[in-house]
Amino acid sequence: MNGGRVFVLHIALQGCLRATDVEYGITADTGGHIRYLLDLVAASGRNPAIDRMEIVTRAFHHVAYAECYAEPVETIDGTTRIVRLLSASDAYLVKEELWTEHDSLVEALVAHIATLDRAPDVMHAHYADAGLIAARVSARTGIPYVFTAHSLGRVKLAAFDRDCAETAGLDRRIAIEEEAIAGAAAIIASSRDEAEVQYADYAAYDPGRIRVFAPGSDLKQFANCATDAHVDALINRFLDDPDKPVILAIARPVTKKNLAALVHAYGRSPALQAAANLVILAGTRDDSTTLEPEIRDNIAELLQLIDRYDLYGKVAYPKQHRPDDIAAVYAHARTRRGVFVNPALNEPFGLTLLEAAASGLPVVATDSGGPNDIVETCGNGILVDPRSPSAITDAILGILDDPALWSRYSAAGSVAIRAYDWDRHVQLYVGLLEEVVRPPEVVERDPALLLVSDIDGTLIGCAQGVDAFAAWRAAQTDVAFAIATGRSFHSAMAVLGQHDAPRPEILITSVGSEIYYRAVQGAVYDRDTEWDGIIAAGWDRDAVAALVGRYAGLTPQSPLEQRRFKLSYFADGDMAAAERVRALLAEHGHSCSIIQSHGRYLDILPHAASKGTAVEHVRRRLGLEPRQVIVAGDSGNDIEMLRSSRHAIIVGNYSDGLGSRADLAHGYVAIGHHARGVIEGVAYFREAAKFEPVRRRVS
Ligand code: GLC
Ligand code: MG
């Protein structure tokens, strides 16, 4: 590092990479990852923490492609240049063939680094093959690397039948990815789904090393767009009453996008048909019988459903549109106070939802995959089970019938533009790189005090409160700071990052069913597998899920909320649900921890798991006395933890009756709300001498 600044060497080997006028689509591999990389590099250049960058790619000659792809160096600006290394072959190679160049590329990169006046502080590998090169070069040079997969072979494999042609080579790609994952100092993912589901089946999967940083997205064009006569005509010629609100879907007509479910929902609901028209932009076509089979069959199914439900005059399905019509299509729907629907069976990221958000169009989106992050971050709509047409209908009607809700979701678009921003991304990214390059010392290995705080409604809830907490926490050098939350590890880390909350040393996540410790190396977290073993005893997840699934009245939360040791449901307003579920499970011989909170959530955990038991486990592992622990919470899922701790802070904005419970009478009910209540409570326990910090042990 140069005066604390970072030199990043990116490795990206696929496609035709150049600094300007990228020829997207010129080859199958000249796609989104190049856009991501160039946007990341541009934003990194604007951040003072990064003072130098190189993008290393492969040089090739090809009569059909420009000569620039053979140029050894292309300067972007004073900070950044592209370096094209010669490997064994100088031909253009598709990504499936890049493995033939692994050895020569490793040698070329090691040699290149040796020629530099200053060694890179960190490498950032993009996509599988670059990850493997980084792993091998890192082993030779000692330079750490971070990895961004962009897309994963295992996800592809799951999307196709095992034997079809497209899976050829995927096994090799997955093996390459395993090597890339195993050696990475940290992995950057774009969504919780990627971090928690898409990576999960890799042998080298280590959740504590993955961080979710939302990518930037060029959304301004959507925010400022109006509909135009061309787009209005494209849509209106199908419709009897073109002024009605529009239910809009934009997706390629492949089975995974599940557009048929939306037509079923619409076709079965007279209320929906009365309230709105349905507009489906499913790619473009001339003669649909000549399309590739999956697309042809999906188009045929849509047309057949429109006919079966006799939806003529109510559904528009334009054959053709231009790419630059899309923004106006969103605007067309927004002008009519419509709703955007993405019913995909799984949506890895969900760019259309961001575009809809930026356009000011509320969304109803699949609860499987990336939309979780988008809807949580932006607050622009409702998640639904894509397999349930009635859930889709209810959600759409709920928005169309409630003008205030529509307006709230519509206004949330501005949040999307701020959150999915490259400069914001780079702020978080730089924090990670600095920790990888210069691991911070984790000072609180032997703390005088352990402070455990819930996140939602406790630490987070007021922006000034979080800022005050961050400043306060920095001064508490004898305190280890832990989080105990209902959120998953990646959801917790992401929300803490978004709110600029201090990084915890310990995370107790998924309502106490998982525990992570910040590694001595600082950037990453280690999972407490001992805790997994303790709580696994007697937990029969499948049997419990099956029993509760048959029990009417509980709606499962999204697939992402279902963890190995946590099954989560909505039990809206049904305050007796916990008791009934407990009785049902007991009847079948299952003893579980059942936790209800905010009058809304119901979590089922192994018997031994709760925030309270997890805090106790952490306390013992840290070798602390019970009097050295302070916990803070606001709602039902904190009760266990507040009850079992001597020093319990109940923040002023508590819910679920916490302030008046007899079993929490020992707690301190703060006047301050959220993080301010936590600061106030710690001061109370320190000053009231109810808490005596023991002196730090001298080791
Ligand atoms: C968080 C989790 C959810 C859980 C709730 C209450 O919101 O995401 O799954 O039910 O906390 O514990
Ligand atoms: Mg809470």
Image (cartoon, rainbow, N blue to C red):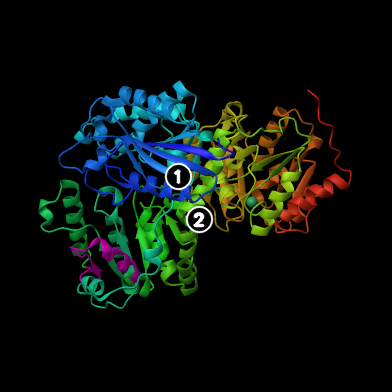
Q: Which residue is mark 2?
A: 377
Identify the element where label 2 is drawn: helix
Outermost residue to the right:
689
Q: Viewer-nearest of labels 2 and 1?
A: 1
Tell me if mark 1 has few (under 14), some (14-19) or many (20+) residues whose alpha carbon lies within 10 angstroms of its own.
some
| x then y, percent, for residue 477 | 76, 39
Identify the element where label 1 is drawn: loop
Q: Nearer the viewer, residue 683 or 564?
A: 683
| x then y, percent, for residue 627 | 81, 36
Q: Which residue is mark 1?
A: 79
Residue at x-position 65% and y-position 54%: 457
The N terminus, quarter of image: top right
| x then y, percent, for residue 540 | 51, 32
Residue 328 counted in the magenta span: yes
Residue 528 counted in the magenta span: no
Q: Which residues are magenta?
A: 311-331
Callout 1: CB less than 8 Å from ligand 1: no
Q: Report whether 367 appears left or right of 174.
A: right
